[in-house]
Amino acid sequence: MKIQKINISKENLGLTRPYTIAYKTVDSVAVSFVEIIGENGLSGYGSSNPSKPVVGESLDDTMKVLENENFDWLVGQDIRNFYKLLHEVHARYPENPGVRVALDVALYDIFTKYLGVPLVTFLGEKIKSLPTSITIGIKNVEETLEEAKEYVGRGFKNLKVKLGISIEEDIERLTKINELYGNKIIQRIDANQGYNFDQIVEFYNRTKHLKLELIEQPIDAKNIDPMRNLPSEIKNIIAADESLVSPKNAFTLAAPPSACRIFNIKLMKCGGIFPAIEIATISQYSGMDLMWGCNDESIISISAALHTAFSCKNTRYIDLDGSLDLARDLVKGGFIIEEGEMRISGKPGLGVKRI
C-alpha cells in the first residue's frame, strides 16, 4: 500500500478549566494534526503539543515546519517500508520533536491498521490495564480539596498534585488530602523543578508519613548533580521528567550514582514512539521503573503513549490524563477508562475514529 496524501492542520481544542504549575498557567490548548492517507483509503493520525520550556520547540514552530514541508519524500512510498520511513522522519527533523512525534504516531497508526492489529499487539503487549493518575494544578487548600473530591467521586484513586511555589502550602495541601482520604487514594506529586536540594530534603522528611508514591522532577533539570546527591531513600521515589528528553539523557540519568529510580517518558519530549521505546530499553537494562506522562494532548497521542506503555514490562505508573479536560477533541475511542483504570480498545492501530 502506497501513501497517497498528507493532511496538516492546527486545531484548537480548548480546556474545561485552567491550571497552574510551578512555571506557568495554562488556559487553552492547541495541537498539530497530521493525517497520512493510503491509496486503499486507510488513514493514520498523529498529533503533537510540545512544551517550549522543556524541548525548545513551540506548537507554532512545529506548524511552521509541517506547513512548509511538501512531503515528496513520503508521498508515494510503500507503507511496508515502515522502518525506513520511520528512520527518515527522525533523521529529517532532529530539532523538532513536535514534528517528529506527529509523523511518527501517524506512521505507526496507519501501518498497524494496514496489518489489522492494535498498535500494542505489534509492539508486544505486556500489560492489560493500569490506573492513571489525574492532576490537580497549583491551587489554594480549599480549591485543592474541592478538586480532589470531584476526582475521587469519579472513581480516580491516584491523584497527582502540582507543587513547587510554597513548601508550607504544598505540605498543607497534601496533609489535608491525606486527612480526608487516608489510604483510599494514592498521592503523587510533581514539583516541576520548583524546589532546590535543601527544600526537597526538607519536604521529603516532613511528608514521609504520607507515603507519597513518587515525586516528579523536584530540582532544576539542567543540572542533575543535586539529584544524584540526594539520599537513596528520596531518589528511590524520584521520577525524572524535564531532565529526560532523549535516549542520551536516559544514559546520563542512569549512570552511577543514578539521579532517580523512575523515568517519566513523554512522547512530546522524546519525539515519538520510536525513541520512547529506545528510552524504555535503556531503563530496563539499568533497573529503572517507567512512568508514562503527557502534556495537554489529543486522544490520538494519549492513545499512542498508552499502547507503548503497555508494551514495556517495567511500566509501573501512567499519568495519561492529558485529554480528559479538553473542551473538544479530533477523534474518539483509542482507550477505555473506568474509575481511573485505562485499557486499550482492541481496535486496529491506535483504535481512534475521526469525529
Image (cartoon, rainbow, N blue to C red):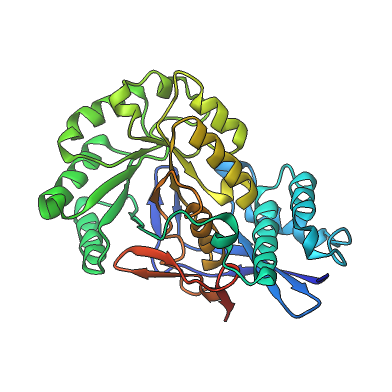
Considering only vertical position in the picture, is 164 above or below 99?
above
Examine the rendering and report whether any part of residue 243 can be seen.
no
- In the image, 177 versus 86, the foreground residue is 86
- In the image, 179 versus 273, the foreground residue is 273
- Asked which quadrant contains residue 134, the reply is bottom left
- In the image, 125 versus 36, the foreground residue is 125
Which residue is pictured at 85% across the width and 66% down the height? 75
Considering only vertical position in the picture, is 291 above or below 34?
above
Q: How many marks?
A: 0
Examine the rendering and report whether any part of residue 18 can be seen.
yes
Q: Position of residue 302 (x, y in %)?
A: 51, 61
Which residue is pictured at 28% across the width and 54% down the height? 158
- In the image, 127 versus 6, the foreground residue is 127
- In which quadrant of the rendered image does the C terminus lie? bottom right
- Asked which quadrant contains residue 240, the reply is top left
Q: Position of residue 68 (x, y in %)?
A: 82, 59
Considering only vertical position in the picture, is 276 above or below 104?
above
Q: Is residue 143 left or right of residue 103?
A: left
- In which quadrant of the rendered image does the N terminus lie? bottom right
Q: Position of residue 18 (x, y in %)?
A: 40, 61
Q: Position of residue 194 (x, y in %)?
A: 38, 35
Which residue is pictured at 36% across the width and 39% down the height? 191
Q: Is residue 315 left or right of residue 304?
A: left
Q: Residue furthest left?
A: 179
Which residue is pictured at 49% across the width and 36% down the height? 284
Q: Is residue 73 left or right of residue 36?
A: right
